[in-house]
Image: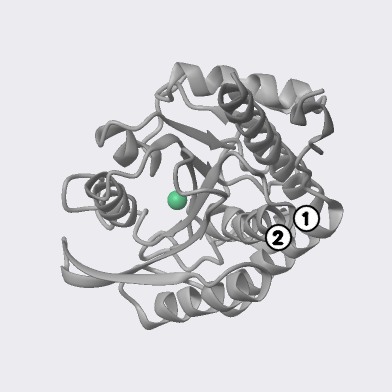
Amino acid sequence: MTGLALAAALVFSSADAHLAYETARELSENHSPRDAGTLRCRLAAQYLYDRINANGPDAKIDKFTAAAPNGSKHFYNIESRYVSHPGNDWIVLMSHYDTKPGVPSQGANDGASTSGLLVALCGAVNAQRPDSINVLFLWTDGEESIVAYGPDDGFWGSRHAAQALKEEKLKISAAVCLDMLGDKNLNITITRNSAIRLKREFAAAARDIGLQDILKAGKDAVKDDHVAFAECGFDAIDLIDFEYGSAPGLNDYWHTPEDTIDKISENSLLKSGRIAMAFLDRANRKAKKRKEK
Ligand SMILES: [Zn+2]
């Protein structure tokens, strides 16, 4: 008899999905727009920090300053670490929480949905305590560009965090970016510029729980926070629903005032959360198996 047979699978419940939705709703309704470098963005970071702490271990706000096209700005990443054992490999789960500068929007799907999801995933992981993986939950600031993506525009939070984790020599086996995963009509794509090994693991994880139909291999490379981790040498993957619009195939709510909480559903957050959790569960089981050999 091995411990494997006795280990319960990690689950993401409907109560977790409710917490994800309520967090996304409050972020959308009370803290928007949340453009990087604004007071409202700082207040959004504080709100998330309090939410995380109410449902998991103490988070940390990492304030840093960086150059932007319209001058130097303060940014606020938030992170919370679940440690099963210091020697175990790390999985980074990330979501940006800022909104697109200059667009009067709640950023309900683009930013708030997955930030709420990450709060709930953090709470669920800490409650269920997987024994063979460590998980770093990261809410990034400044994902959105002000003018156009470039070395000094966009992805400030992920570049800052990836560099710091590389310097810390943290053993990261996967960096997973979750973006725009609350759409009522959920179609998740795995972007082309994701690590092949992780694409396979996510496809298998979705199959494990019967949700393979909502997860597709995307044809396009997408610039998102995972790129900063890939550039630092980590295996990285991006899950995004880039069909967020008024009709199937359109993305016309994205970066517009139409990106509001009424377009988001708790049921979609439940599905997205279950897929992320199934991925963590596979990683935990595989790591445990390796240790037992
Ligand atoms: Zn965006």
Query: How much space separates mark 1 and mark 2, taking CA atoms?
Result: 5 Å
The relative height of residue 136 versus residue 108 in the rendered view (above or below) is above
Quick check: is the Cβ at mark 1 less than 8 Å away from ligand 1? no
Q: Circle 2: is it few (<14), some (14-19), or many (20+) Cα within 10 Å?
A: many
- On screen, residue 102 versus residue 242, left or right, reads left
- On screen, residue 9 versus residue 145, left or right, reads right
For the residues bearing labels 1 and 2, Cβ distance under 8 angstroms = yes
Q: Circle 1: is it few (<14), some (14-19), or many (20+) Cα within 10 Å?
A: many
The relative height of residue 122 versus residue 52 in the rendered view (above or below) is above
The circle drawn on residue 17 is 1
At numbered mark 1, what does the secondary structure look like: helix, strand or loop?
A: helix
- On screen, residue 159 versus residue 96, left or right, reads left
The circle drawn on residue 20 is 2
Quadrant (top left/top right/bottom left/bottom right) for the N terminus: top right
Looking at the image, which is closer to me, 234 or 7? Answer: 7
Q: Residue at x 73, y 58 (%)?
A: 127
Residue 286's x, y, as percent? Answer: 62, 25
Residue 214's x, y, as percent? Answer: 72, 28
User: Hey, which quadrant is residue 271 in on the image?
Assistant: top right
Residue 130's x, y, as percent? Answer: 67, 45
- Check disc 1 and give the amino acid type: Ala
Q: Residue at x 57, y 27 (%)?
A: 291
Residue 67's x, y, as percent? Answer: 14, 63
Q: Residue at x 57, y 46 (%)?
A: 180
- On screen, residue 201 versus residue 269, left or right, reads left
Tell me if I can see residue 22 in this picture. Answer: yes
Looking at the image, which is closer to me, 227 or 241? Answer: 227
- Check disc 2 and give the amino acid type: Ala
Residue extending furthest front?
Answer: 1
Q: How many marks?
A: 2
At numbered mark 2, what does the secondary structure look like: helix, strand or loop?
A: helix
